[in-house]
C-alpha cells in the first residue's frame, strides 16, 4: 500500500483497517478502526488533516483532502461511494455520499443524511440529518426512513467485514 510521511506529518492507520495496495495515504491522515479503503483512493493530509471514523467505507477512486491547517472529518460507518470527492468538509456518522458526488469546503452532511449520485454539496452548505439531497447544487428530496437505515446498515456491515475478508483472502491471481 502507498502510505507516506510528508514533511513530518505521519499517517496513523489502525491495524483493523484494510487499505488496498494501490490506495494512497499521505501525511496527517488518521484511519480509525475497521475502515475499508478501496483501489485508487487518495487521502491527502499533506497540509491539512484527514480523519476517517471506524467502520467507514472509502470506495474505489475516492479523493479526500483538506485545506492548509484545516480538517476533513469523516464520521463512523460512513459510505463514500466510488469516485466521490470530499474537501475540507464534515461528514457525520452513518451518512452516505453517492458515487461521483462532491462535498466541498466547510460543508457539513448530517447523521444518516444521503447525498445522491453526482450531486454537489456547495461550500458552507449544510445537509440536515436523515435527509436525502441531490442535484447541482444539492437540494432536499425527502427524508430518510427506518427501512432505508436498516438496508444501509446491512451494506455498511458488509464493508466492515471486507476488512478481515480482504486481508485473509485477497491473493494475486497467477495461472
Image (cartoon, rainbow, N blue to C red):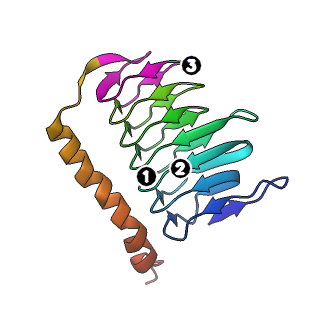
Q: Which residue is at the front of the view, 47 or 63? A: 47
Whole-Å distance between the Cαs marked 2 and 3?
A: 20 Å
Name the residue that disc number 3 marks.
Answer: 123
Q: Picture coordinates of residue 111 (x, y %)?
A: 37, 35
| Circle 2: element type | strand
Q: Which residue is at the front of the view, 175 or 92? A: 92
Question: For residue 136: magenta?
Answer: yes
Quadrant hosting residue 11: bottom right
Q: Picture coordinates of residue 99 (x, y %)?
A: 40, 38
Name the residue that disc number 2 marks.
Answer: 52
Q: Is residue 126 left or right of residue 162?
A: right
| Circle 3: element type | loop
Labelled pair 1, 2 in contact (Cβ < 8 Å): yes
Mark 2 closeness class: few <14, some 14–19, many ≥20 residues within 10 Å: many
Q: Is residue 35 visible?
A: yes
Mark 3 closeness class: few <14, some 14–19, many ≥20 residues within 10 Å: some
Whole-Å distance between the Cαs marked 1 and 2?
A: 7 Å
Mark carried by residue 64 = none
Nearest to N terminus: mark 1 or mark 3: 1
Give the magenta part as a residue range.
117-140
Labelled pair 2, 3 in contact (Cβ < 8 Å): no
Image quadrant containing the N terminus: bottom right
Q: Residue shown at 32%/36% (left/top)? A: 112
Quadrant hosting residue 140: top left
| Of marks 2 and 3, the one in the foreground | 2
Q: Picture coordinates of residue 50 (x, y %)?
A: 62, 45
| Residue 56, placed above or below residue 48 | below
Name the residue that disc number 1 marks.
Answer: 56
Question: For residue 131: magenta?
Answer: yes
The residue sitting at the left extreme is: 147
The residue sitting at the right extreme is: 7
Q: Picture coordinates of residue 96 (x, y %)?
A: 36, 39
Amino acid at each position: 500500500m502507498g502510505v507516506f510521511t510528508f514533511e513530518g506529518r505521519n499517517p496513523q492507520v489502525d491495524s483493523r483497517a484494510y487499505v488496498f495496495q494501490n490506495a494512497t495515504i499521505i501525511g496527517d491522515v488518521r484511519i480509525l478502526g475497521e475502515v475499508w479503503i478501496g483501489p485508487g483512493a487518495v487521502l491527502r493530509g499533506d497540509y491539512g488533516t484527514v480523519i476517517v471514523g471506524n467502520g467507514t467505507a472509502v470506495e474505489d477512486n475516492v479523493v479526500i483532502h483538506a485545506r492548509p491547517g484545516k480538517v476533513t472529518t469523516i464520521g463512523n460507518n460512513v459510505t463514500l461511494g466510488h469516485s466521490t470527492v470530499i474537501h475540507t468538509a464534515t461528514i457525520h456518522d452513518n451518512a452516505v455520499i453517492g458515487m461521483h458526488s462532491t462535498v466541498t469546503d466547510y460543508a457539513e452532511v448530517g447523521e444518516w443524511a444521503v447525498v445522491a449520485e453526482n450531486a454537489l454539496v456547495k461550500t458552507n452548505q449544510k445537509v440536515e440529518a436523515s435527509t436525502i439531497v441531490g442535484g447541482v447544487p444539492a437540494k432536499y428530496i425527502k427524508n430518510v426512513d427506518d427501512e432505508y437505515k436498516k438496508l444501509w446498515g446491512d451494506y455498511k456491515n458488509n464493508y466492515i467485514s471486507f476488512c478481515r475478508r480482504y486481508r485473509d483472502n485477497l491473493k494475486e491471481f497467477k495461472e
